[in-house]
Image (cartoon, grey):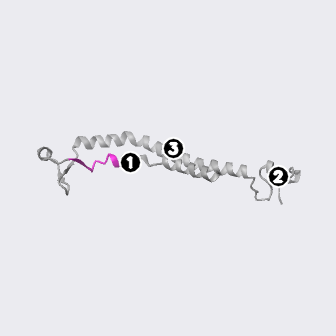
Amino acid sequence: MRKLGVVACLLIAAQLSACATKSLWDSTSADKYVRVRADRNSEDEAKGNGLAYFKSDDGKSLYVQKTAGDRCRDYAVRLVGTPFTLVIDAVGTVLFIGTLGLVAVVTTLTDGDVSREGRCKGLAQCKEPPHEDDFAPQK
């Protein structure tokens, strides 16, 4: 049951750290072309505006270069959105590391693992109460 909880925590943390910044930058790439349905009007409009374009292999789509306004908008979205996506990515990472640390601490405290000196960590797990000598420094 405990292993299932650890796996669930790992999956949740992996979902939270889904790299929002990369997604934002990929979706607002100023170098990408805009895909439109290929017809006579769209091709004439691209020529009339002096935009670079090319047709897809099947001839059903036309890929048109973004206008200066579109590129400017993409850069503005990146400028405003990147700080927020960085926070989202950082929160996912912190939650992931914090979850692992919490699971490790809880597992250690509840299992009654033995410490380096060979003493019982969880007092409830000890068969006899600790002696004063147990807390004295080791030589």
Up the image or down, 32 lies above or below 76; here it is below
Q: What span is colored magenta in the figure? A: 26-36
Determine if the magenta segment contains residue 35. yes
Residue at 57% over, 52% down? 7
Alpha-carbon distance for marks 3 and 2?
39 Å
Q: Provide the secondary structure element on which disc 3 rests.
A: helix
Q: Which one is nearer the viewer's eye here, 57 or 93?
A: 57
Up the image or down, 4 lies above or below 74; here it is below
Q: Nearer the viewer, mark 1 or mark 2?
A: 2
**Where does label 3 land, which residue?**
91
Determine if the magenta segment contains residue 117. no
Q: Provide the secondary structure element on which disc 1 rests.
A: helix
Q: Mark 2, residues whose alpha carbon is within 10 Å: few (<14), some, or many (≥20)?
A: few
Asked if the residue at tag 2 contacts the one at tag 3, i.e. Cβ–Cβ closer than 8 Å, the answer is no
Q: Which numbered disc, 1 or 2, marks the residue that appears first in the sequence? A: 1
Asked if the residue at tag 2 contacts the one at tag 1, i.e. Cβ–Cβ closer than 8 Å, the answer is no
**Where does label 2 land, which residue?**
126
Could you tell me the amino acid type at mark 3? Val
Q: Which numbered disc, 3 or 1, marks the residue that appears first in the sequence? A: 1
Q: Which numbered disc, 3 or 2, marks the residue that appears first in the sequence? A: 3
Q: Provide the secondary structure element on which disc 2 rests.
A: loop
Q: Nearer the viewer, mark 3 or mark 2?
A: 2
Q: Mark 1, residues whose alpha carbon is within 10 Å: few (<14), some, or many (≥20)?
A: few
Could you tell me the amino acid type at mark 2? Cys
**Where does label 1 land, which residue?**
23
